[in-house]
Image (spheres, coloured by chain):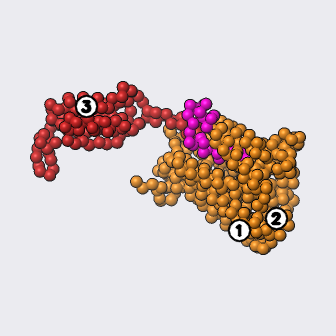
Chain colours: A orange, B red
Amino acid sequence: MINSGDTAFMLISAALVMFMTPGLALFYGGLVRSKNVLSTILQSFICLGLVSIIWLVYGYTLAFGPDVSGFIGKLDYLFLKGVSMTAPMVDTQTIPHILFCAFQLMFAIITPALITGAFAERIKFSGYLLFTGLWVTFVYLPVCHWVWGGGWIGAMGALDFAGGTVIHINSACAALVSAIVIGKRKGWGTEPIIPHNIGMSVLGAGILWVGWFGFNAGSALAANGAASMALMTTHLAAGCAAFSWIVIEWLKHGKPTTLGAASGAVAGLVAITPGAGFVDPMGAAIIGIVAGVICCLAIGLKTKFGYDDALDVVAVHGVGGFWGSLATGIFAVEAVGGKNGLLYGNPEQLWIQFISNVAVIAFSLIVSWILLKIVSVTTGLRVSEEDEVQGLDLSQHSEVGYII
Amino acid sequence: MKKIEAIIKPFKLDDVKEALNKIGVQGMTITEVKGYGRQKGHKEIYRGAEYVVDFIPKVKIELVVDDEQSEKVADAIINAARTGQIGDGKIFILNVEEAVRIRTGEKGTSAV
């Protein structure tokens, strides 16, 4: 039965999650050089168009349509046919089916947008659009179905409250492969490539933080205690991670930085995502503190292994997401989300978390690689060297971000 | 006539301007410039990556005075702009062959 309180809360949550994508656009936009600010913002923003169309036509039904052997959804909801505005999707839900569909769409939009941080400042817009369309179709939709749509990972008992596996680990794997396939930016490692507007990035991170309340609390799908706990765990993890990141910076480099605090907050938000509705406040704080430390240290991986993950998607979303998912298996408390983790006598949960993530990592790495190869022989992936030096704003879109 | 070009730390501009006004200097031109001398640049850190920025902001003051005044002007700039730290800047004194005031056509020191 539809509950108006739950419906009101979920309408707001869906709107909050939608706002994360323009927030991400600002976060990423500030971190690139000024000649690429608009192209970077657009790569996030256009997902609101592209993914929405895919979702309407076949996306929602492949992710959430009636299950076919644990792998994909049936085509019952093609063009959102039969997605009711008066009845819930299933009896256990209390919100209109169309609202559930809209809420889930916002997750599908931000996930490919997260990947853009890896290949920022060098990808061709046409190649980007093709890759994103293919990636949503062949990677996001199946993984989403596996975890949330009645698929095999959900059936295995894996815990992913708001998308640690589906969104963060999944997008970070695609980010890693695309950074490697597309190659390093010209001048990477030899000349300084520095952010052009950290204030813009902090504003974006702030919007993400607010939006994340809809992301995580909304994943309770009702205005209830679970949503309240998820909001609190989300906030605590983000705050703790912002703090622990700058402490590590201070110790390692002698100065705490604004970008470090903003990055730490995002890392904490990522890490708490899978466990937001399963852990208690103390668990959340520990998840956040550890996320700030390990994500900050993981930034060094790209220099060590020589891949140009421009805006650190792998270190923040990959490492943070993987830690958060395992931590869910460690800190889950029955009193909060109905499942115990390792710390409360259920070591098996940690194993399930591990297996489900390894499966998604392997799938996402391989399929993303294949898709990138397809795009590279069709539209092409990378702009010419001349266009890259000129900046993507002018070379891809004939506009500039700043006229001063 | 001499042209005096002084490159100083930006935060010393007000002090220098005041010192020059005190000794009767009528006007000056300033430019925001970037550069480095022996002190080199500064370090910036973004997500743990350290970048050395070679060119650091400075202010260049240009003014033209008659020959006798140039020494006094240089001393005033030195006194006002000196912090004793590395990177305080430089003063260059050049010969000027002619000066013309556009409005009136006056020439020489009266045009300055």
Q: Are marks 1 and 2 in contact (CB under 8 Å)?
A: no
Cα distance, mark 1 to mark 2?
A: 21 Å
Spot occupied by residue A208 in the image (x, y as percentages of width and height): 63, 53
Residue A207 occupies quadrant: bottom right
Q: Which residues are magenta?
A: A246-272
CB contact under 8 Å: marks 2 and 3: no
Return the residue found at the far top: B84
Amino acid found under the numbered disc labelled 1: Leu
| Badge 3: chain ID | B
Q: Which residue is mark 2?
A: A93
| Amino acid residing under circle 2 | Gln
- Main secondary-structure element of the magenta-colored stretch: helix
Q: Position of residue A323 (x, y in %)?
A: 74, 42
Give the structural element (helix, strand or loop) at label 1.
helix
Labels 1 and 3 in the same subunit: no
Q: Which three-letter amino acid code belongs to the residue tagged 3?
A: Ala
